[in-house]
Structure formats: C-alpha cells, structure tokens
Amino acid sequence: MARSLPPLNWFRSFEAAARHLNFTAAAEELGLTQSAISQQVRSLETRFGVQLFERKARGLSITDDGRKLLPQVGAALEILGAASSTFDAGPTEQLLTIATSVSVAQWILAPRIDAFLANYPDLRVRFLSTVWPDEFKASIADVEIRFGAEKQVGHNALRLGPDYLVAISKEPLDGLEGQRLIETVGTSMSWQNWSAAHCMQQTLVPSLYTDSFGLALELASKGQGVALTSSLLAAGALAKGELFQIGDAVLVNPEGYFLAIDENVKAAGAFRDWLLDAIAA
Amino acid sequence: MARSLPPLNWFRSFEAAARHLNFTAAAEELGLTQSAISQQVRSLETRFGVQLFERKARGLSITDDGRKLLPQVGAALEILGAASSTFDAGPTEQLLTIATSVSVAQWILAPRIDAFLANYPDLRVRFLSTVWPDEFKASIADVEIRFGAEKQVGHNALRLGPDYLVAISKEPLDGLEGQRLIETVGTSMSWQNWSAAHCMQQTLVPSLYTDSFGLALELASKGQGVALTSSLLAAGALAKGELFQIGDAVLVNPEGYFLAIDENVKAAGAFRDWLLDAIAA
DNA sequence: ACCTAGCCATTAGTAACGCTAATGCCTTTG
DNA sequence: CAAAGGCATTAGCGTTACTAATGGCTAGGT
C-alpha cells in the first residue's frame, strides 16, 4: 500500500466492461459515456503496463491478464458495496443466529448443541460459518464466536478456555519420528516453539499447512499426522480417548476463540451461559 | 452496485486514520495533508450518515460504526493492493496451495490426503478454507474446489460427483418422527423437496440451519438430528457404516463442488487426477 | 493558573481530474 | 456497397481533490 491505488471508478469500469465485453453497454450500466469507459480502462492498462482487453469490431475479448485481475476486482467491489450498505436497517427474526468459527462449530458445538436445544424445544438455530473474523456476519448475528488474538478483539468478548497449544494425533506416540507435522498458518506459534518447549534440538518442518486449528485437528483425527492445535477444540475427543496428546508440555496459545453476544437477545445470553458451563465440564 | 461508491481515497484515508487514530499521522503515511484526511473522512461520514470517529484533543477514537466498517474496508483495500501488484513479477514457491470449501476439506480431503502425499513425499500442501466461493483465495491457489451451482462456476470447472441430496443420520431410522431436521440455507432444495420425493404429506420444519453441507453432516454425525446433505460428502462415512441414509429416494443436487486447477502447475494436475480416482473408488 | 503543544475543523484558492460531445477509423453485417 | 456497431482520440469545461493558512479546543507540563 506504499504506492497510491488507481481510482475506484477505473476498477468499476473495468469490471463492468469485463462482464459485458462491451464498453458501450458498460457505459450504459454505469451511467457514463463509452468514451469515459474507454479512457478509464486505458488508464488502468497504462498504470499496470498490461493489456486487459483486446479490442474487436463488435466489442472486446478479455486477455489472460484481464481475466487474472477480474476476480480480485469483483471481490473488492462487492466488499465495498456491502460495506457501503452496512448502515441500512434490516429486520430481525425470531431465530438464534450464531456466527462461529468453523473450528468451534465442528469440534465444540456440533457434539454438544443438543444439550442446549433440549432446554429450548421451540428455538431454531442458524449457523453462519467463518474461517477468519467476519464483521459482516458478526453484525447480523446474535452470538459471535471469533478466532483471533486478544488485542484484535473487542473488549466485550470473553475468551473460551482454558486453551493451550498441544500436539495431537490419532494414536498414542512416543515421539514425532516419521510423522507428518500439521501447522496452522496465521498464528503466532509454530512447531519450533513446541520443539523448544520439549528441549529438542531439531528443526521441525511441517508438511501440511491449514488456515484453522479445526482443520488441523481434523487431519490429525483422520490419521494424517500430528497437529499443533488448540486444546480447547481437542478436549472432547481427548476425553473420549479418540485422540491423544503427544508430549507433556503445553504452549501458551496467543490466538483463541472469543465469545460475544447481543445482550438484547435473551436466547443469546442463555446460549452463552450454557456454553461456558459445557466447556468447563 | 446500483448506486455509485464513494471514492477509493476516502476509504484509504478512513482506514489509515483508524489504524493511527490520528489524522495527522494518517496524512503523513498517505503523503497528504491533515486537512485532506479530515475532509475525506467527513465526506464519508456524510455519505453514510454515521459518525465513524469521535474527535478528541489528542487524536481520535473510533465509534462502533467505524469499527464495523473497518475490516471490510481493510479487506477490500488489501485485495485491490494485491490486484494492483499482480503484474509485478513474484516468486513462486514449491508448495501446492488448495483453496477448498471447508466441507470438502473435512469430509473428502482430510480422510484421504495421505494417499496423495505418499506419492509426493517432498511436496508440502497449504489449505485455504472457504465457506462460499472466495475469488481472492482462488486467484492465489493452484487448485480450487468451490461450492456453487453450475451456472455460477467457470466453464473450466469439473463437478465432483456423483452427488445427490440425501437424508443422513447417525443411526439407522425408519422415519423422521422425533428427529431434529438439519437444512443448509442458500441452496435450492429443502426438506419440502425430500418430503415430496418420499410421497409424504406433512410439512417438514427444520430446527437447525447451517451454511454448509459439511456442517450439516457434522451435526448429523454427532447425533444432533437428520441432515439433508450431499451424498458426495457422506460417501466415505456411509461406506464405513459410520452414518446411515434415511429413505430410498435421492434428490438432484443443483449445487455441488467444482474443481478447477492452474494447468501450469504440475502438482495441481496430479492432485486432480488423484482426487477424481479417489472419489470414484 | 498559565502557557505550549497537539490536533482537529474550516476556508479560500487552484491545479488536476473526470467527464461529455464530437469526430474519425475499422470491422462486420445485410 | 452502405449502414451499423463500437472502439479511440480530442477539445473543452464543470467539479473535485487537494494545499496553505487560520482558528478553536483540550491536555499536559511548569
């Protein structure tokens, strides 16, 4: 972001032209003239030093470079469009909406949600799954369980815990020889920290990288290797003897799962109380 | 996108100000004056009709509305920044990056990936998880497995199959009485379609809504009810007798999982061939 | 209590931008 | 061959986006 970005209107014109493969139609959609579209796309091409379209007598064809750029531009425009309508009011419905990390959904809620529902036979629940914190989903949810580091999370959020980093595999093991190592990217700790905590001299190199502790744990539970992952997620399966911890040391886990609720929704408060009890058990 | 978006520079100034909580520092970073930042943020606030910052003597604090907007703006700026540097030469690394629906990661890849890795002992794999199609992740991946309907997916993508909609539960059941029904929102079919296909007269009302077939299947596998979900995802667990299909009829599944690869990456081609074989077995 | 520093908001002015209308060129279609 | 479609380019002008200057308010230090 050190250099300035092209104007947003250039991206919009590019995206519309790519959809229509026709500057004139794109102009009509955007309420501009063909000339404006032509100039904006030309400016973008000049800025990037690539040809985004081939011009033909009856419209355009998109180049490989244009095709490469399009999804990213489309995604950014959609996000900014959604961001720009964030402040429009929306109706609420009698339904508990839980925006939750997929890891928590899979490893904590899926095995346990019946106990909560048994107390509320008429309640319906909608899950919105997230891989990383998703403010849009959070903004429409009654309950949010987000993954992140404490400093990135609002002050109203309660960390689910205790939660440490542990090495987990499907079978009890005496060590790591011959095992694939599974590590979650985007988190502060790695297998090097685990190695140091166990006074090992060797450099541990992962074979499999995931972007969630939950998927790392899933890979371990399917016997693909040893996952460095969250003890909170693994607790249920560890208790049932379905998974095993390798090594005795645990690492402090800087990133974890944080619960926040809309205090105006009674069911959300009930869900929070239930979940905290369930985890403590 | 019917209405015009604010200028990109407004968003940039907002984002920089939110990071620094100080217009003067944001101005310095962006190479503008404090006055320009102040005016741009003011313009954005006027456009949205909300206060994004509280002004204090020694800088800013961000409002709840500002906090709500920031991640989306940050994400879009990051995407456009990455898009703008797409045409700078970048190093590629010897690593297979797979952008995949979390449902496929959990139910298809996690149980099987070892068979692929056994053939490529030096290959490392990075998973990028998606709930819905994510063009940014797709653009940086060597392999993409996305969820959607055929008309929304590029013509290069191959549907993984066969894939039908089936009712799945943890135990064999003679019917649905007393069971919670689990349905995936955002898909074309519902329990009404299943009811009709089984010549049932009653209206089936789900208790649990999920936003992925994978989470629906997970809930079923944990005994939370009967999930209407993808036979492709369930196939492995059905074959092992870990899950059971309820009723004999299957529904056509308009939405499924589509595989696309970067043909320039040899490992991606190998992965595709392997996966198609693995699913057919 | 007083003074200074920090940092915001506002104003006036101007260079640059972003667009339009008009025109020209090329290809395709009937 | 003529007309239609659709692109590129140019000149012109209204608007925007920025700067420099100034003012107001609060916090911190003496």
Image (cartoon, coloured by chain):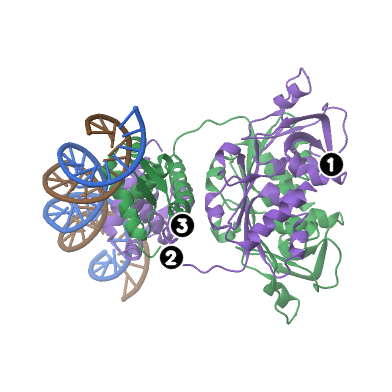
Chain colours: A green, B purple, C blue, D brown
Asked if marks 1 and 2 fall on the same chain, the answer is yes
Q: Amino acid at mark 2?
A: Asp
Asked if B36 appears above or below B252 in the picture, the reply is below
Residue B27: give x, y in percent of width and height.
32, 62
Determine the CA span between mark 2 and mark 3. Answer: 16 Å
Determine the CA span between mark 1 and mark 3. Answer: 42 Å
Q: Label 3 is found on which chain of the structure?
A: B
Label 3 near label 2: C-beta < 8 Å?
no
Assign a secondary structure to mark 3.
helix
Q: Residue drawn 34% across and 54% down?
A: A44
Quadrant of the image occupied by residue D27: bottom left
State left or right for residue A187 relative to residue A235. left
Residue position for label 3: B78
Q: Label 2 is found on which chain of the structure?
A: B
Residue B88's label in the rendered image is 2
Determine the CA span between mark 1 and mark 2. Answer: 50 Å
Q: Residue drawn 27% across and 61% down?
A: B33
Question: B274 or B231, which is in the foreground?
Answer: B274
Sequence-first tag of 2 and 3: 3
State left or right for residue C2 relative to residue B250. left
Asked if marks 2 and 3 fall on the same chain, the answer is yes
Assign a secondary structure to mark 1.
loop
